[in-house]
């Protein structure tokens, strides 16, 4: 670059030119790099949520089957109204735990992507 501009290498003017070129390059590529980082984070997030949602129908079917079995077993020992109350409360606890678990997946995936990005790029 110094030869093109007819500036002797190692002079203050060539160093200043080199520094300005670096700053302009970083300023120009900053938005593009930020967009690529957002895209990569979004890709990791979508993959994590998709992997988590894959077994969800099977989990729900097993939970519904288990709640029916629990209700059937409790009605032999307790009145039906009390059995129903216990099963509904247990179903509410399962729903709360499932909501908290699936709600944490995007947060954990984003944190993992951020830590991987920091490990790669310092």
Image (cartoon, rainbow, N blue to C red):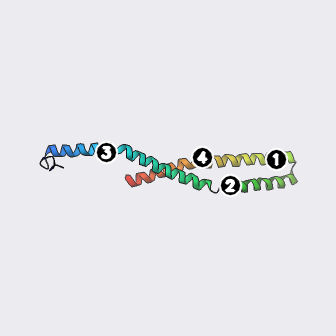
| CB under 8 Å between discs 2 and 4 | no
What residue do we see at 24% from left, 45% from top? Answer: 21
Labels 3, 4: front one: 3
What residue do we see at 14% from left, 49% from top? Answer: 10
Horizontal side of 64 relative to 75 (left or right) equals: left
- Which is nearer the eye, 15 or 86? 15
Percent of width and height locating residue 104: 58, 47
Q: CA distance from mark 2 to mark 4?
A: 17 Å
Percent of width and height locating residue 28: 32, 43
Q: Earlier in the sequence, mark 3 or mark 4?
A: 3
Q: CA distance from mark 3 to mark 4?
A: 37 Å
Q: Which mark is residue 107?
A: none
Horizontal side of 115 relative to 48 (left or right) equals: left
| CB under 8 Å between discs 2 and 3 | no
Question: Which structural element holds mark 1?
Answer: helix
Labels 1, 2: front one: 2
Q: Which mark is residue 103?
A: 4
Q: Earlier in the sequence, mark 2 or mark 3?
A: 3
Question: Which structural element holds mark 2?
Answer: helix
Which residue is identified by label 2? Answer: 57
Question: Which structural element holds mark 3?
Answer: helix
Q: CA distance from mark 2 to mark 3?
A: 47 Å
Percent of width and height locating residue 96: 67, 46
Horizontal side of 10 relative to 116 (left or right) equals: left
Q: CA distance from mark 4 to mark 1?
A: 28 Å
Residue density around tag 2, few if under 14, some if 14–19, many if 20 or more, within 10 Å? few
Q: Earlier in the sequence, mark 4 or mark 1?
A: 1
Labels 4, 1: front one: 4
Up the image or down, 89 lies above or below 65; here it is above
Which residue is identified by label 1? Answer: 84
Labels 2, 4: front one: 2
Q: CA distance from mark 1 to mark 3?
A: 65 Å
């Amino acid at each position: 670059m110094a030869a093109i501009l007819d500036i002797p290498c190692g002079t203050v003017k060539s160093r200043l030119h080199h520094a300005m070129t670096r700053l302009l390059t970083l300023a120009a590529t900053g938005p593009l790099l930020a967009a690529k980082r957002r895209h990569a984070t979004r890709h990791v997030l979508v993959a994590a949520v998709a992997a988590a949602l894959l077994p969800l129908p099977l989990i729900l079917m097993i939970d519904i089957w288990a709640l029916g079995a629990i209700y059937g077993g409790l009605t032999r020992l307790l009145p039906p109204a009390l059995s129903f109350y216990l099963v509904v409360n247990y179903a509410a606890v399962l729903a709360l735990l499932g909501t908290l678990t699936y709600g944490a997946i995007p947060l954990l995936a984003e944190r993992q992507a951020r830590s991987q990005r920091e490990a790669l790029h310092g």
